[in-house]
Amino acid sequence: MVTFTDNSPGISDVQGFLVAGAGCDIRNKNTDRLDTAVIYSKTPCVAAGVFTTNDIKAAPVRLCQARLAEGKPMHGVIANSGNANACTGDQGKTDAARMVALAEQLTGAPAGSFFVGSTGRIGDLLPMAKVEKGIAEAASRLASTEAESRRAAEAILTSDTRPKTATARFTWQGKTVSVSGIAKGAGMIEPGMATMLAFLATDIGIERELLQKCLWRANSASFNTVTVDGDMSTNDTVIVLANGASGVTVTAADTALLALFQEALNKVAYALADKIVGDGEKITKVVSVQIKGARTEAEAETIARAIGNSLLVKSSWYGEDPNWGRLMDAAGYARIGIIEERISIWYNSVPALINGRPIPENKPAWKQEVKNRRFSITMTLGLGAADYTLLATDLSEAYVNFNKSE
Amino acid sequence: MVTFTDNSPGISDVQGFLVAGAGCDIRNKNTDRLDTAVIYSKTPCVAAGVFTTNDIKAAPVRLCQARLAEGKPMHGVIANSGNANACTGDQGKTDAARMVALAEQLTGAPAGSFFVGSTGRIGDLLPMAKVEKGIAEAASRLASTEAESRRAAEAILTSDTRPKTATARFTWQGKTVSVSGIAKGAGMIEPGMATMLAFLATDIGIERELLQKCLWRANSASFNTVTVDGDMSTNDTVIVLANGASGVTVTAADTALLALFQEALNKVAYALADKIVGDGEKITKVVSVQIKGARTEAEAETIARAIGNSLLVKSSWYGEDPNWGRLMDAAGYARIGIIEERISIWYNSVPALINGRPIPENKPAWKQEVKNRRFSITMTLGLGAADYTLLATDLSEAYVNFNKSE
């Protein structure tokens, strides 16, 4: 059985990992705000990652992808907030390389064994003198304490209003296996740029290809199923490190153990994704858009995203007056071939439309449902058996105000 | 030479057309607001049309498409605002059919010779008793006067703040050919639904297939190149009627005459599209997004739409603080394979980025450019020779407020 701890201490929950958070004023605001995090395992880790598919990838993303492709044992992650090191040309690449080199040197890890993640403003060069101080401070603080772990979770935040951590654990033959993660939000940053970062750690032993498969599965059911404003960043990064310190090793053949590990990984990833949406910039609603009865999952997803990213739909959620006609319209312009007469729509459990026929007498009831901060909208298409659920947010006037300047 | 008149009287500029606007309180607000328009030609017209590609098409759209497919001579259009007759099931079809039948009967036109357009709230049945009164009043007022023509242009408006009319004319062998049109806006309606309606009339003689080709060309360079909020309606309709009353007939072989007619049609369509964007709901900026140097026009369009529909980009235009990093990010997630080092960006004529390198010293200059209500953003990709220009708007807090309830 997998046990789950929400808002856990984070990375320090995992055996063999040291962690730290430091502040070096990357934002140049003369504050002691934390902005630099290090995650480190003395013993080598197997690593897996997923990254933004944006054509424009920030320097840290390109560095991580290259290291992952090499497939060497890895030891840690260095991350900063306040500056995305994106659209920064050759200097950006040099700076990202300098960050990992310094972290490796200060921890005594082999060259090439650190990943790097940056998040914040786009197009500005990193203030490297400060960043180097931050890395040095963080490296000197490395510990397995809850306090440092929570500082690391805080250091990667940008426009987030709270840290995001989660841990899942299970026991296997008397040994405890932990999966833990920290993340930062999908809203816009500073408000100059959107980025989602998530760093996961586990003490299971696992081979690289299998870990990558497990991460893809977890990712497709978590970070890939959320939307705040439909803008995809240049820096989105999810990395998982597995150091084997639990003494438990999983292989593809151990189906029972693998299922437990996958469940633990999924739970942590989903909890972090849910927190990202729930802490989206200036949102007031979290809406689970459940599309059912599509011919394929891809078609269901296309419709869910058309609805979840429609300005009209999002504005109506904000106003707690969600015209089902706007849902129909957005589903229609997804153009997968829906048929009006087969569509039914529910707000939570209250039907608003059955087989294309509105139920106007239910309007007071479903208007009550959407007063909740969280509610679900279910649309059945009557075309097939495939489903998709997207976690989306409303669009508030405050979002526009917050993002109107860089 | 084609002469162009902006904010012209509209349909009455075209020989042989009668027009009228009436008010029957479709909105049920006890006002004398105009909401019903009739356009009518005693002599039969050749017709062409383009319609929403939304899977969910309102009853009037389906009726128009069926009539167009029949290819019979047509005589007019009956249109209403205040109710879109969309998602209204069988009763909606019956009501749309009743509207055209009544207009045909009252004008003495043959059965099957009227088109119908509706715009306004989605999901409500038309108040047919009122609509019938409105059609009767409009039919009784039919005239070729400027006053009635302007009433018709007003009757189709919803959340528009002003009527939209334009006329283009040219002389051919001593005879004057006119193309005129009226349109209503692409913002959201009432604010329950988005719809763009445009009705064009011309007194040229032309065959059906050729008129349809001319309309496709005009449409792809006008109504198809604008975006307000990226939401596509269930009711979008553009119809052109050609009655030949000028005594000039164009064929595909008359390349000089055809070019003149196409130019006139393009000018009217583009002027109406431009007015639709400029009168978008609660907008404060109209931005011409010019993507150049793509491999194909389709790729250029994909990038232009990613930029023009990005919430972050639109919010930054509203704030007159348009981070070029957001343009890069949006262009990147269009995922057509752009290369950072080849991209240059201008605000009007001021470069902000050349071949991937920012020019920070130009920031005060381009921040000055974006203080204008209208400005252009040019992005060159350095991948090929194809271009695309999209006319887009900003996103204001007032838009969200306006659309938060139905």
Image: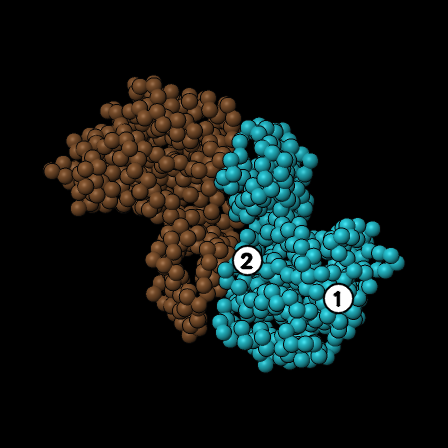
Chain colours: A brown, B cyan
Residue drawn at the location 31% of the way across and 19% of the way down: A110
The quarter of the picture where residue A134 lies is top left
Q: Position of residue A296 (x, y in %)?
A: 38, 53
Q: Residue furthest left?
A: A174
Q: Chain of mark 1?
A: B
Q: Are marks 2 and 1 in contact (CB under 8 Å)?
A: no
Q: Is residue A298 left or right of residue B56?
A: left
Label 1 environment density (alpha carbons within 10 Å; few <14, some 14–19, many ≥20): many
Q: Chain of mark 2?
A: B
Q: Position of residue B356 (x, y in %)?
A: 56, 29
Q: Position of residue A283 (x, y in %)?
A: 44, 51
Alpha carbons under labels 2 and 1: distance apart: 27 Å
Mark toward the start of the polypeptide (2 vs 1) = 2
Labels 2 and 1 positioned on one and the same chain: yes
Label 2 environment density (alpha carbons within 10 Å; few <14, some 14–19, many ≥20): some
| Residue denoted by label 2 | B53
Regarding residue A127, the answer to whether it shows in the image is no
Q: Secondary structure at mark 1?
A: loop
The quarter of the picture where residue A371 lies is bottom left
Residue drawn at the location 54% of the way across and 73% of the way down: B93
Residue drawn at the location 75% of the way across and 66% of the way down: B243
Q: Position of residue A132 (x, y in %)?
A: 41, 22
| Residue denoted by label 1 | B243
Regarding residue B248, the answer to whether it shows in the image is yes
- Pick whichever, B61 or B122, lies toward us: B61
Which amino acid, by three-letter code, is at mark 1? Answer: Asn
